[in-house]
Image (cartoon, grey):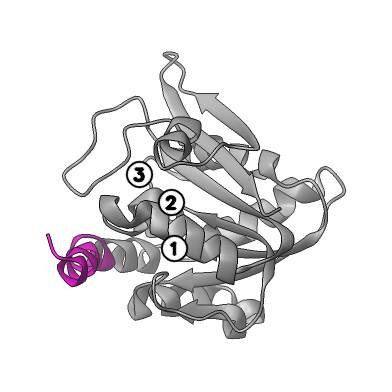
Amino acid sequence: MRENDYYQHTLELLEDSYVAADERGDLAGGSGSGGGLARWRRKRRVIAAAFDHDGTWLDVGCANGLLMETLCGWVADRDLRVEPYGLELSQRVAQRARLRLTRWAERIWTGNVMTWMPPMRFDYVTLMPELVPAELRGAMLVRVRDQFLKSAGRLIVSCYRPGAAAGQHGRSAQSAPLLLRELGFAADGFAEVHDEDGTLWTSVAWLDRK
């Protein structure tokens, strides 16, 4: 699949369902997760382990902004303060985030992570590997590290359901540290959470910009 076709397929696959879920009040569905908010929190809260100091944070693929909202509270439990920003491929989905999070509306941008130029640099950036085709994932990490992060910033990669088989749209079937290793990077840290049956549910790894 050509690169532009990949992004168009992403929009066709996700945009309508994300917008519809958010419009009916299903915040987890509007952020790309089934099963409700409690399940969503169990899957996502582990991302907060990657935050160890105050700073600015860009969530690439922010959807309806639910992670922007909740992660601020999770890190505050450890007396940390982050200022959230969002980048979303879909204009329609980004607009749902702006309508929900009016106080942050001007810091939620629309763009493709491979071409968008950030107006500022961040202490933290979170992203998922499936934002781009598999052959571009290494290039995405390099681009975000070099153009989005402040000096000594941290790039945080999340893989969901890494114990499952890879889906047709390139969902990563690897743990985040393994994915980074296969792309030529050594993780500076990682955290993981398992489902009730012991299956690896969410795997998070991070790279510190030296």
Element under label 3?
Answer: loop
Residue 161 painted magenta: no
Indicate which label's residue lies in the foreground, 3 or 1.
Answer: 1
Front residue of this view, candidates 208 and 57: 208
Quarter of the image where the N terminus is located? bottom left
> Which residue is labeled 2 in the image?
128
Instruction: Write down the region rendered in magenta.
Output: 1-16
Front residue of this view, candidates 118 and 68: 118
User: In x, y percent, where is residue 5?
Assistant: 15, 68
The crowding category of the residue bearing disc 3, from other C-alpha atoms within 10 Å (few below 14, some 14 to 19, many at least 20), is some
- Against 79, residue 120 (above or below) is below
Q: What's the CA distance linking mark 3 and mark 1?
A: 17 Å
The crowding category of the residue bearing disc 2, from other C-alpha atoms within 10 Å (few below 14, some 14 to 19, many at least 20), is some
Front residue of this view, candidates 161 and 38: 161
Indicate which label's residue lies in the foreground, 3 or 2.
Answer: 2
Precedes in sequence: disc 3 or disc 1: 3
> Which residue is labeled 3 in the image?
34
